Image (cartoon, helix red, strand yellow):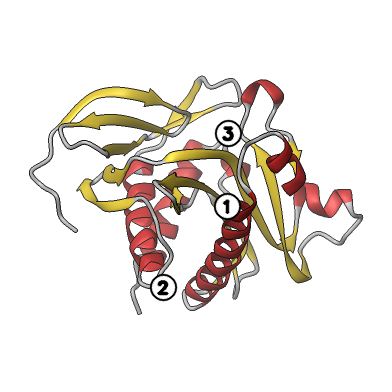
């Protein structure tokens, strides 16, 4: 649905990778993706040329792709190369993480061979709270501490599993293994919608043929290598076949 003309107004939020702006349309915001790469302290570590445009373009496409499978999202339309118009959600302070392959902390915690496939996807919840270092929680924490209602958690679990199946198939057709991803949800009136972003920064991908780990985090100290990786991933994901 197009709602232009729409005017971007004052900045209302600035995070590690994005900024949010108010607009002259009630209930709508502009979300801007940044080129800056921040370190763990929230300080600018480097500027990655094209990062914001890549993540915005991929997120715009994937939100629309999920909508075509009847997955509700906050996406409305692309506003500029680095910006999208979104519906204003009441965000649920839980980060949902899905694992399809055992890597990193998961592999270490359960003494699994790095890169081993899981018999069934693992869904984890983390409280979005920097002061508490984003602790891992379960559904009982979410209910007991008032972060979400029982039906909301059931909907989040169902949608996360559906999104995983959709994205696994999408990435596989482009020569990628979807190792895992993180996603956030919010409320639009009484409805649960996917919010935030689905991008190169939030999905962990491996090259199927080359068995190559396309990991943005490992290139944090190599801005030039990271810039090339963003371009490669964006070009391959832009293939709509």
**Label of residue 69 in the image:** 2
The local secondary structure at tag 3 comes to loop
**Label of residue 221 in the image:** 3
Q: Position of residue 92 (x, y in %)?
A: 54, 40
Q: Position of residue 5 (x, y in %)?
A: 7, 43
Residue at x-position 44% and y-position 34%: 17
Residue at x-position 61% and y-position 66%: 161
Task: Depth check: give the residue in front, 179 or 186.
Answer: 186
Q: Position of residue 169 (x, y in %)?
A: 52, 76
Q: Tell me the crowding category of disc 1: few under 14, some 14 to 19, or many 20 or more residues within 10 angstroms, Cα based.
A: some
Mark 1 or mark 3, which has the lower sequence index?
1
| Marks 1 and 3 close (CB-CB < 8 Å) | no
Q: Tell me the crowding category of disc 3: few under 14, some 14 to 19, or many 20 or more residues within 10 angstroms, Cα based.
A: few
The local secondary structure at tag 1 comes to helix
- Quadrant in which the N terminus appears: bottom left
Discs 1/2, front: 1
Mark 3 or mark 2, which has the lower sequence index?
2
Residue at x-position 23% and y-position 46%: 81
**Direction from residue 217 to residue 78 in the image, left or right:** left
**Direction from residue 47 to residue 110 in the image, left or right:** right
Discs 3/2, front: 2
**Label of residue 152 in the image:** 1
Q: Find the residue positioned furthest to the right.
A: 111
Mark 1 or mark 2, which has the lower sequence index?
2
Task: Depth check: give the residue in front, 152 or 118.
Answer: 152
Q: Is residue 129 visible?
A: yes
């Amino acid at each position: 649905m197009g709602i232009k003309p729409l005017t971007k107004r004052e900045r209302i939020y600035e995070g590690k990778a994005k900024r949010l702006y108010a607009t002259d349309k009630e209930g709508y915001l502009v979300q801007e993706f940044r080129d800056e790469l921040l370190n763990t302290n929230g300080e600018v570590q480097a500027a990655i040329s094209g990062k914001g445009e890549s993540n915005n373009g991929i997120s715009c496409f994937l939100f629309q792709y999920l909508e075509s499978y009847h997955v509700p999202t906050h996406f409305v339309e692309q506003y500029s190369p680095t910006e999208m118009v979104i519906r204003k959600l009441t965000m649920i302070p839980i980060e949902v993480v899905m694992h399809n392959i055992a890597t990193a902390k998961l592999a270490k915690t359960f003494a699994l061979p790095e890169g081993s496939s899981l018999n069934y996807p693992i869904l984890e919840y983390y409280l979005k709270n920097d002061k508490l270092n984003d602790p891992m929680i379960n559904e009982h924490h979410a209910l007991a501490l008032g972060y979400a209602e029982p039906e909301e958690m059931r909907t989040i679990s169902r949608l996360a599993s559906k999104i995983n199946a959709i994205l696994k198939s999408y990435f596989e057709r482009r020569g990628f293994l979807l190792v895992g991803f993180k996603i956030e949800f919010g409320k639009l009136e009484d409805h649960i919608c996917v919010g935030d972003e689905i991008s190169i920064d939030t999905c962990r991908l491996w090259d199927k043929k080359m068995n190559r780990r396309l990991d943005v985090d490992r290139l944090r100290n190599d801005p030039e290598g990271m810039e090339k990786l963003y371009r490669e991933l964006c070009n391959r994901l832009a293939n709509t076949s």
